[in-house]
Image (cartoon, rainbow, N blue to C red):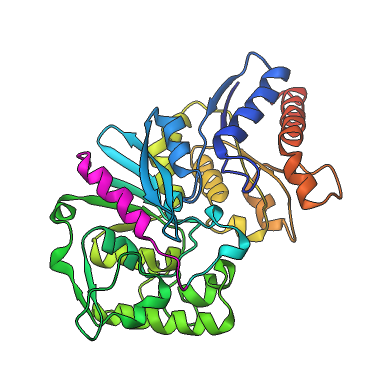
Amino acid sequence: MKVIIAPDSFKGAMRAEAVAQCIAEAWHDVCPDDELSLIPLSDGGEGMAGALAAAKGGKYLEIPAFDALMRPVTARAVLLEDTAVLESAEANGIERLTASELDPLAASTYGVGVMIKTLLDAGYRNFVIGIGGSATVDGGAGMLQALGMELFDSWGSKLPAGCGGGDLRHVAKVNTSSLDTRLAECKIKVACDVTNVLCGANGSAAVFGPQKGATPEMVATLDENLAHWAALFGSSGGFPGDGAAGGLGFALRKILAAELVSGAELVMAYSGFENALAGADLVITGEGCSDEQTAYGKLCSCVAKRAAEQNVPAILVSGALKGDTAALEKLFAGCFSISPGAVTLAEALAGTRRNLMRTGASIARIIHLTGY
């Protein structure tokens, strides 16, 4: 039997590579003769670079960069032949900050720009960038500064490096001609499954600002600042996807001519998932928590739909199943929660490996006992 194990990460507990390895280990304990293909996936957020490295055999490059508060960090990118794969969260990620450090007025994407510049210096011109998990709402201004763009206030003074969301209101003029000229040679794909616009009620500040530490007053300020920032480039801030990662999507698309694409679809294409479906008998996918929304465009649903096109059934393994699961049950041949019962979140996270092993082994037994 040929089984494809293609999970997303279990956020806060295990990256996709570890989840796939865990399920595979449990499956082989029960059915050692089955052929298992491990293809860890991502929707473009945390774990994307690692998932592609595991699937394609890429190598890691460590890059000196800066976190969202301009503190030195070591970020990692993955090199796949002529393509550099990076997660912006390696620099501006919310996971790098404690809850008390969250400050979307100050947080900057400058470190993301440093990563891109380093890769330009290394000769790369093809980029795949995942922009999930950010702590920033700066419209990508910091990133553009690191790539050479100059920002000036109304007095004609150049703003210092590392502009945050609170600084955008002070930008009176931008000098796009100072951008690194090598960017014109680049092809950039941005893995982004967020369709939010930059400004307004469905914009970056209003929807995602609070989880990045923004108070209601900060949200109003950030939204005004983003609208001002967009106007500097002749935009109303209403393009779908521009609000991703605190407006980083806007800067990448509008100024760097990047293409915003479905993160799930992009990673599946790069990982070889579609080719692996040929001759497969079963697909197992999974994520940290599943609800009705999973069925409408999230990675696991993309996996199931692509598998269904090849008449391959898919099983969902989730850290938790919440709410009405009717839509999930139509999409998947089976939906399994690994939770052993009523436990705290901390206990559930700590027991992820054990619970995955138990669930993976149980599914293997069921499949083979029924003679599938």
Quadrant, the N terminus:
top right
Residue 257, picture quadrant: bottom left
Across the whole image, how many numbered discs are drawn on residues? 0
* Residue 72 percent across, percent down from the top left: 41, 50
Residue 236 visible in the shown view:
no
Q: Is residue 218 above or below residue 262?
A: below
Q: Is residue 176 left or right of residue 235?
A: left
Residue 266 visible in the shown view:
yes
* Residue 242 percent across, percent down from the top left: 37, 69
- The reply to whether the magenta stretch includes residue 111 is yes
Name the residue located 37 percent from the left edge and 64 percent from the top edge: 248
Q: Is residue 345 left or right of residue 169?
A: right
User: For this rendering, which residue is in front, 251 or 294?
Assistant: 251
Name the residue located 75 percent from the left edge and 34 percent from the top edge: 359
Residue 173, picture quadrant: bottom left
* Residue 225 percent across, percent down from the top left: 39, 81
Q: Is residue 291 above or below residue 247?
A: above
Q: Is residue 64 left or right of residue 298?
A: left
The residue segment tinted magenta is 105-125
Q: Is residue 95 above or below residue 361?
A: below
Quadrant, the C terminus:
top right
* Residue 321 percent across, percent down from the top left: 73, 52
User: For this rendering, which residue is in front, 196 or 212?
Assistant: 212
Q: Is residue 339 left or right of residue 285?
A: right
- The reply to whether the magenta stretch includes residue 240 is no
User: For this rendering, which residue is in front, 318 or 84?
Assistant: 84
